[in-house]
Image (tube, rainbow, N blue to C red):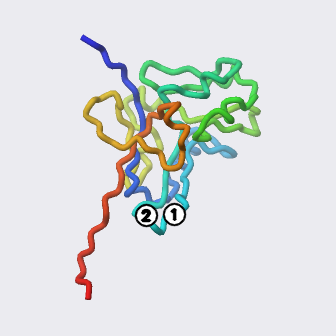
Amino acid sequence: MKIIPKQFGFVIDLSKCIGCRGCEMACQSEHHLFDTRRRKIIPLANHQESVFSYLSMSCNHCANPACISVCPNRCFQKRRDGIVLHNPQKCDGCKSCVGACPFGAPVYNQKTGKIDKCNLCIDRLDQGLEPTCISSCISKALQVINLSDSDNNFSKAIPGIKMARFTNPSVRFILPTDTKCFWIKD
């Protein structure tokens, strides 16, 4: 019997994100961040032509994280459940991971002189609670799931990021469906 390891990841429903930044602000508050952001709301450039116009992104806890391979101080580690952690005690703020990550997830904190990134609220997850970004999402656009479950059929495509195929990010998308017109056209 083959044991499939857990791989926690985010699912983002692109038709539900309204760009309110509630997830972003809740994360900053939960982790006492004032000058850095672990989660960012990205307005999509061509939103007039699309059903969705915002993308909520943070560390994607990649299956093959670039941050781990480039860090000279071995500050990063990947847990058995797929969560990529950063150890600030080992960090000298060299920013190698900042340049290597195609998603801009590791950020340099000016106050501490070290790198900071999303840890999927592991303290909350370990207590059976949702990450704070998810519990604060008023439109329910964010979820955390075990991506190793064979029954998930979400899109893996990340808009505009070609490097994603090398890192294999643990983020999936529920793509918007075409809207339906209910009025009569003349």
Give the total number of marks visible in the rendering.
2
Mark carried by residue 50: 2
Amino acid type, callout 2: Ser
**Which class describes the residues within 10 Å of circle 2: few (<14), some (14-19), or many (20+)?**
few
Rendered residue at 58%/45% (across/down): 28
Q: Is residue 11 above or below residue 65?
A: below
Check if mark 1's residue and mark 2's residue have beta carbons within 8 Å: yes
Residue at mark 1: 46
Rendering coords of residue 62 (x, y %): 50, 30
Where disc 2 sits, the SS reads loop
Q: Secondary structure at mark 1?
A: loop
Foreground: 102 or 33? Answer: 102
Assign the C terminus to one quadrant of the image: bottom left
Q: Is residue 70 left or right of residue 93?
A: left
Please tell me in which quadrant of the rendered image residue 2 appears: top left
Give the CA distance from mark 1 to mark 2.
7 Å
Q: Identify the residue at the far bottom of this view.
A: 186
Query: Is residue 27 rendered to the left or right of residue 174?
Result: right
Name the quadrant of the N terminus.
Answer: top left
- Reply above or below: 14 against 71: below
Question: Residue type at mark 1?
Answer: Asn
Q: Is residue 130 left or right of residue 86?
A: left
* Mark 1 Cα-neighbour bin, 10 Å: few <14, some 14–19, many ≥20: few
Q: Residue 158: percent from the left, percent from the top?
A: 47, 45
Asked where in the image residue 92 lies, by quadrant, the reply is top right
Position of residue 172 measured from the top left corner of the image (x, y, whole percent)? 40, 41
Residue pictured at 74% horizontal, 29% vertical: 93
In the picture as drawn, the residue positioned furthest to the top comes out as 1
Residue 57's label in the rendered image is none
Estimate the x, y position of residue 176 in percent, counting from the top left. Answer: 35, 56
